[in-house]
Image (cartoon, rainbow, N blue to C red):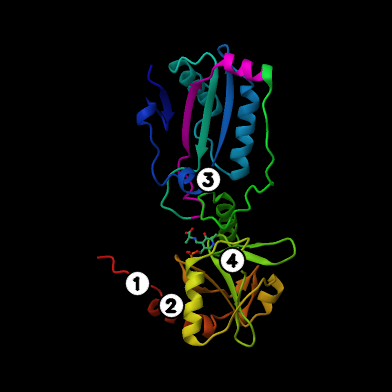
Amino acid sequence: MSRIAYVNGQYVQHSEAGIHIEDRGYQFADGVYEVCEIARGNIMDMTRHLDRLNRSLSELRIAWPMDRKALIVVIKEVVRRNRVYNGLVYVQVTRGVARRDHVFPAAGTPSSIVVTAKRTDPKASAARAAKGIKVITVPENRWERVDIKSIGLLPNVLARQQAKEEGAQEAWFIDPDGTVKEGAATNAWIVTKDGTLVTRPAENGILRGITRTTIFDVAKKLGLKIEERGFSVDEAKKAKEVFMTAATTVIMPIVAIDGESVANGHPGETTLSLREAFFDVAERTPAC
Ligand code: PDD
């Protein structure tokens, strides 16, 4: 029997079901989900699951894709069409489809919704329960692995959105001890009074930005010294210059932190010279 999925208003063959490539769930993990057990033809604890879905959506300010009653109809219909007597029903809602940008898409962008159902074998589960199962332990690291350029970018999305709402263009993540980690989608730098470039070591806690790495070559060409060490927000506020790096912005001067003017409120000379020299130093592969 072929499986059926519900995708954005339509019941479609599971094997042909698809979501747009610029869906925010696909690009940013910008979405939420629920899984309900189906036992002997009953959807278990659906009210609580939908209450939690409501909470997750509201915490992330994602709009309901349809009203709750309509969603219940869809859930039941997916279970029915897949003839699932024992199994699971899966509901996923994302912030919808938009041209890739960390900040939320324009108001009114419809959320995406997918509902699927699958059968499970209650006998196999009972057999496992009769014997018990084994676990292993792993360090709690959900999600410390920001060194991996993963698409799990929901915290970055929320930080960028907050920056936008507070009249800024980037948000810096700060360690509990006040040390700057990096931006939501950029690496962070300061220039000290004596002209030394300072950036956090890439060994832990940040993404090793390609632009960041190329800045080492640019600095060498310009005869600038780089110190890889952590710096605090306080130090950044007192620094001669502050800037950020990423493929999207290359080298971008920063003139305010948390509403406080920094670097005299103007892009600094060193930052601008790095920006200018970057193109000649970075590898250039003709696109055609
Ligand atoms: N972001 N840190 C984070 C968290 C980033 O997402 C990025 C890049 C960087 C800078 O890396 P690079 O110099 O390789 O671009 C640092 C990309 C541009 C983005 O998500 O749009």
Disc 2 to disc 3, C-alpha distance: 33 Å
Q: Earlier in the sequence, mark 4 or mark 1?
A: 4
Local secondary structure at mark 2:
helix
Between the C-alphas of marks 3 and 1, the distance is 33 Å
**Mark 1 beta carbon near ligand 1 (under 8 Å):** no
Q: Is residue 156 left or right of residue 4?
A: right
Number of marks: 4
Query: Would you name the residue on which mark 2 appears?
Result: 278
- Give me the residue at 41% from left, 78% from top: 281
Tell me the crowding category of disc 4: few under 14, some 14 to 19, or many 20 or more residues within 10 angstroms, Cα based: some
- Say which label, 3 or 1, has the lower sequence index: 3
Find disc 1 in the rendering and name its residue: 284
Q: Disc 3, ligand 1: is the CB inside 8 Å?
A: no
Q: Which badge, 2 or 1, comes first in the chain's sequence?
A: 2
Name the residue type under label 3: Asp
Mark 4 lies within 8 Å of ligand 1 (Cβ measured): no
Determine whether the residue tagged by mark 1 lies in a helix, strand or loop.
loop
Q: Quadrant of the C terminus?
A: bottom left
How many angstroms separate mark 4 from mark 1 (CA)?
A: 24 Å
Q: Quadrant of the N terminus?
A: top left
| Span highlighted in magenta in the image | 102-129
